[in-house]
Amino acid sequence: MTTPQRTAQRFPAEQARAFADAVVAIAMTLLILPLMESAADVTRATSVPVWLDEHGSQLFSFVLSFGIIAMFWVNHHRTFQRVKEVDSGLLWCTMAWLLGIVWLPVATALSGHLEADDRAVKAVYIGSMTLVALLSLLQLLWLRAHPVLHEMDPATINGTVAMATAMLALFAVCLVVAVVFPGLSYFPLFLMVGVGPLGRLFKRIMGPGRPTGPEPQ
């Protein structure tokens, strides 16, 4: 394959990075809309404590989802800061990841309006997070397989893959526990504090990775 043909398949990562940042910012903003609607319906006879009590589940879902999306964005932003170019495969992985991010405000609204012990609600809400974690891992695996796209050494990309694998594994565990034991509400998500230790364990298992040269131009 000639150099012009291969170059045409890749383009600088700045536009893709800026687009992803904008979409994530919009998704995080959309999280507040259900609360804005309920606040607009407040009458003078309604006190603030009453409103907070009536919409406690929505407030909890909002804060939780905001934190989860922020975590996904921070990890994505740190990775893409070291991505030089984007090819079609990475672009479509990123578009799928953004689809999951944009869906999260919908899953959040459902979890805030429906019963907390509803298994289907748990499956949709935590399942959506699990899907986004899977798509995050797929982006990293694509980058690891195509070192020409980024500036990360093998040890760095392997460590990042290990952390993403740990995050996916813990989200999957949270999903199973929340569906099997719906009375626990969303407290199984506190298992996510174990991402760091589990990620370090996976990193030791995976090893530093083998040095890879640049792909032929």
Image (cartoon, rainbow, N blue to C red):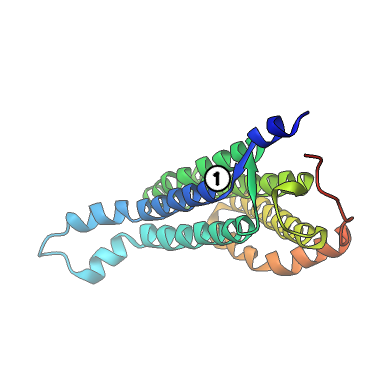
Q: Is residue 79 left or right of residue 145?
A: left
Residue 208 on image: x %, y %: 86, 62
Element marked by disc 1: helix
Residue at the extreme left:
44
The answer to whether 69 is drawn above or below residue 11 in the figure is below
Label 1 crowd (10 A; few <14 / some 14-19 / many >=20): many
- Residue type for callout 1: Ser
Residue at left 77%, top 39%?
217
Please tell me how many numbered marks the rendered image carries: 1
Q: Is residue 209 left or right of residue 74?
A: right
Q: Please state the horizontal and vertical placement of residue 47, each as a whole percent of the image.
A: 18, 69
Which one is in front, 78 or 181?
Answer: 78
Identify the residue shown where x is 47% and y is 43%.
Answer: 103
Task: In this rendered view, identify the residue nearer to me: 123 or 146.
Answer: 146
Q: Residue at x 45, y 60 (%)?
A: 66
Q: Nearer the viewer, residue 67 or 211?
A: 211
Residue 144 % position (x, y): 77, 49
Asked if one can make out residue 80 in the rendered structure from this viewpoint, the answer is: yes
Residue assigned mark 1: 128
Residue 53 versus residue 174 in the image, above or below: below
When asked about the image quadrant of residue 191, the answer is bottom right
Q: Residue at x 78, y 44 (%)?
A: 145
Q: Is residue 104 visible?
A: no
Q: Quadrant of the N terminus?
A: top right
Above or below, 113 against 78 in this view is above
Tell me residue 192's x, y (percent): 63, 63
